[in-house]
Image: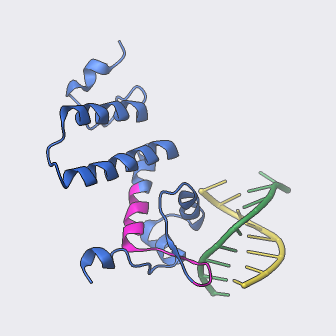
Chain colours: A blue, B green, C yellow
Amino acid sequence: MDLESRKQLPLFSIGIVEKLTGLSARQIRYYEQHELVKPARSAGNQRLFSFVDVERLIQVSALLDEGLNMEGVKARMKRLVANETQDKKQSEPTDQQVFERMRQEMLEHPGGSGSSEFQGDLFRFYRKR
DNA sequence: TTTCTAACA
DNA sequence: TGTTAGCA
């Protein structure tokens, strides 16, 4: 049994996850409805979260704090997963992939003037004037 | 005691 | 999101 597998073992109750993430049970269940996490279920229908689930909830929380809405978080998570699977075969992103990230960034941050992955880069050429 | 689902003064 | 109701 390798480390990756252990991190996916369904071990924590929602009460433990509340303390681990700082989120309320209500929020955790709400994020589950939006498929941001998919905890396993015990025989009694109780949610069982893994280390991976906890890490994901923490990231969702961080994204929400950045001002993103549920749609924005979903889009960001989707890109992260897409990049993860891609990086295994190709470490350097293609120009087309970089452009796609930039486009997503602008969609998620209308008027985007705050923190961006593309500050001081080509990003300014796409700002409204 | 804790968690679950559903619903809303 | 909080909170409450009624179960398991």
Q: Is residue A47 above or below residue A30?
A: below
Q: Quadrant of residue A100?
A: top left
Q: Residue A118: tell me if it is visible.
A: no
Residues A51 and C5: in front is: A51
Q: Quadrant of residue A88?
A: bottom left
Q: Position of residue A90 (x, y in %)?
A: 16, 48
**Depth check, front residue: A17 or A35:** A35
Q: Which residues are magenta?
A: A43-59
Residue A46 among magenta residues:
yes
In the rendered image, residue A25, in percent from the top left (x then y), is placed at: 57, 67
Question: Left or right: where does residue C5 sit relative to residue A14?
Answer: right
Residue A129, given in percent of the width and then of the height, sits at: 35, 12
Does residue A88 appear anywhere in the picture?
yes
- Compared with A92, A58 (above or below) is below
Q: For the point 49% across and 65% down, which residue is it?
A: A38
Residue at 31% x, 77% y is A5
A113 left or right, relative to A45: left
Q: Determine which quarter of the picture holds residue A124.
A: top left
The residue depicted at 26 percent of the width and 30 percent of the height is A99
Give the percent coordinates (x, y) of residue A63. 41, 49
- Residue drawn at (39%, 50%) of the image: A77
Check residue A27 for magenta coloring.
Answer: no
> If the image is split into quadrants, where does the N terminus of chain A sit?
bottom left
Q: Is residue A53 left or right of residue A88?
A: right
Badge count: 0
Q: Work out whether residue A4 or residue A15 is closer to the camera in this orientation and state it.
A: A4
Residue farthest top in this picture: A129
